[in-house]
Amino acid sequence: MAKPFIPVALTANDLLEGDAVWWTGEIWSPSLSAALIARDEAEAAGLSARAADPAEGARVVGAYLVELDDGGRPRLRREAIRADREPTFAYGAAAPLRDAA
Amino acid sequence: MYRYDEFDAAFVEARAAEFRGQVARRLSGALTEEEFRPLRLMNGLYLQLHAYMLRVAIPYGVLNGGQMRALAEISERYDRGYGHFTTRQNIQFNWPKLRDAPDIIDDLAKVGMHAIQTSGNCIRNTTTDPFAGVAPDEIEDPRPTCELIRQWSSLHPEFTFLGRKFKIAVTGAEADRAAIRVHDIGVQLVRNAAGEPGYRLFVGGGLGRTPMIGKVIRDFLPKADLLPYLEACLRIYNLFGRRDNKYKARIKILVHEVGIEEYARLVEEEFAAMDGTAAPDAAEVARIEAYFAPPAYRERPATSALFERMKREDAGFAAWARRNVHPHRVPGYAAATISLKPIGGAPGDATAEQMRMMAEVAERWSLDELCVTHEQNIVLPHVALDDLYAVWTRLRAQGLDAANRGLVTDIIACPGLDYCALATARSIPVAQMIAERFTDQALQEKIGPLSIKISGCINACGHHHVGHIGILGLDKAGVESYQITIGGDATETAALGDRTGPGFSYEEVTGAIGALVETYLERREAGETFLQCYRRLGMDAFKERLYAAA
């Protein structure tokens, strides 16, 4: 039996800003929730073609497909952290420093 | 400390202008990413998980207050108001924009700094003992040697495109505080039977996916021969090192595969055939050494009544003095470690305000000098004993007073999955959870010297192989899993840690570290450190408790 297709979205990093961005079908958006989700092989092939388009190389870097779960979140922790656009802890001036007891 | 001369300044400015042109050509479409990537990497600009990352070189970790202020300014103007000090004694900014990168490089050049050779398959920043120049046990100050290597290796035409990156560390003392035995080449200043200064050289050490302890290739090398000999070592590596597999391309693999005897034979043969042009000019060596002449210390009594009184009156200061104040070769002075490992912080991180505070303290009380340590802390190398309480009070105002240097909460951690594109597991949050468990200062001091080192992937940027307790974060079928090693050692008694057994989940790893520490506390003999206890008892004693609940 064929394995069920896992939905995917196309991501990359913005060339100028470096930020993680997602292909919406029209533009590259910083929000995963705006991403165009491929729900079958044909749609995924369309996203792969977009990733390979040399014209995109002038706007983004390193485009690749990310697998999503049923809720539209990345299946891998790495991609989930990346999609959240932040480390999983408070950093810089927001770090909750305190003295040893 | 060394100050860039006109040649250095012109070189850095030329590279900044060149990089600006490269970025412009990338943005115009004249360069593809494939063409641009090696160029940006040669200038320290990576593309990480969330953003670009710029790694700035701090030669052998030494910088002055003005340079630290410039780093603070850059972090605020172009980044998110903080920086991350690394195990290579450098600093990384985690959120710069490509469009700002040329301006950042220009701003760095204004204070004699740059990002050249902080990435790529070249000779990286030479690291050293953070107490270089002030350690009482030092044979000689290792920094002139580091500077000589920096000048020799900067854009060296033969060694700019090596098979892999190449790391050199130098120590001036028998006590190894620079981890020289786990570097591609380790350099130790020694004296021979006649009392002449020279070097003992180690080769083929390294961490990563194939960790190895370096082997002695020369027990004594006259000082004047250092650069020719290094050149011979690099040349043999460049000629015979593998290029077919990046995971087998480090010099340690070559030395391991051909054997130290054969590698040494090839190097000696090459060295003997050299014509002497690689040797540095004696006048240039003298010029470099002059920059590292001892600063203008004031004559002071060997002890300080004020220092002793404040230790009695302020328990917090006394704890800091016990852990973070170190002997100095000049009477009346000490070196002090500013810990970048506060409870709740990310190891090695400092905000712009903290950087400014460190700059101010260095300018006012440490003869305008700071040193980044490979343990991701900062050393103030020249503080008068009389001034230590004032220094501590100022540091305390910015949360920089953690009294934990060398203790269980002084954890080395790589950026891990929260920042790094290569990582397979989180490391900073693991460090934070462990630090939270050992918040009690009295407990930390009861445990005594214990280095925990955490890497978020097999590349081992957190040096986990040589932690007394090492933690390696891996991905097991989409779930973070942490392998633990014990018995690692980065010093003159260097050893690679032994793996305990199956890994632990993210939720379990703190408890596992707790079990190891409890075992040590229960079974140690009087005065015995964690490492000594492990070497006496062996793995089974620790493993039994570690996996008891499984």
Image (spheres, rainbow, N blue to C red):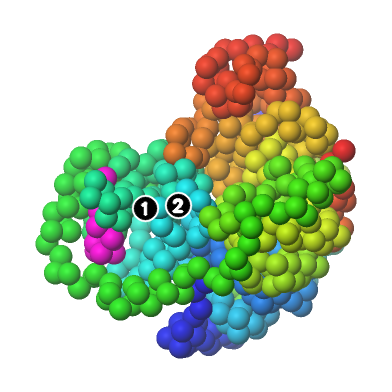
Tag 2's secondary structure? loop
Residue shown at 17%/69% (left/top)?
B276
Residue B456 locus on image (x, y percent)? 63, 43
Residue shown at 63%/62% (left/top)?
B300
Residue shown at 74%/76% (left/top)?
B73
Residue A98 locus on image (x, y percent)? 87, 48
Tag 1's secondary structure? strand
Residue type marked 2: Glu
Asked if residue B362 is among those painted magenta in the image, a careful observer would answer no
Query: Which of A16/B523 is in front?
Result: B523
Residue shown at 38%/68% (left/top)?
B148
Is the residue at mark 1 from the same chain as the one at mark 2? yes
Mark 1 neighbour density, 10 Å: few (under 14) some (14–19) many (20 or more): many
Asked if residue B220 is among those painted magenta in the image, a careful observer would answer yes
Q: Magenta residues?
A: B218-229
Which label number is shown at residue B189?
A: 1
When asked about the image quadrant of residue B165, the answer is bottom left
Is mark 1 in CB contact (under 8 Å) with mark 2? yes
Query: Which of B286/B21 is in front?
Result: B286
When asked about the image quadrant of residue B394, the answer is bottom right
Residue type marked 1: Leu
Q: Earlier in the sequence, mark 1 or mark 2?
A: 2
What residue sits right under mark 2 in the picture?
B138
Mark 2 neighbour density, 10 Å: few (under 14) some (14–19) many (20 or more): many
Residue B14 locus on image (x, y percent)? 48, 87
Above or below A81: residue B229: below
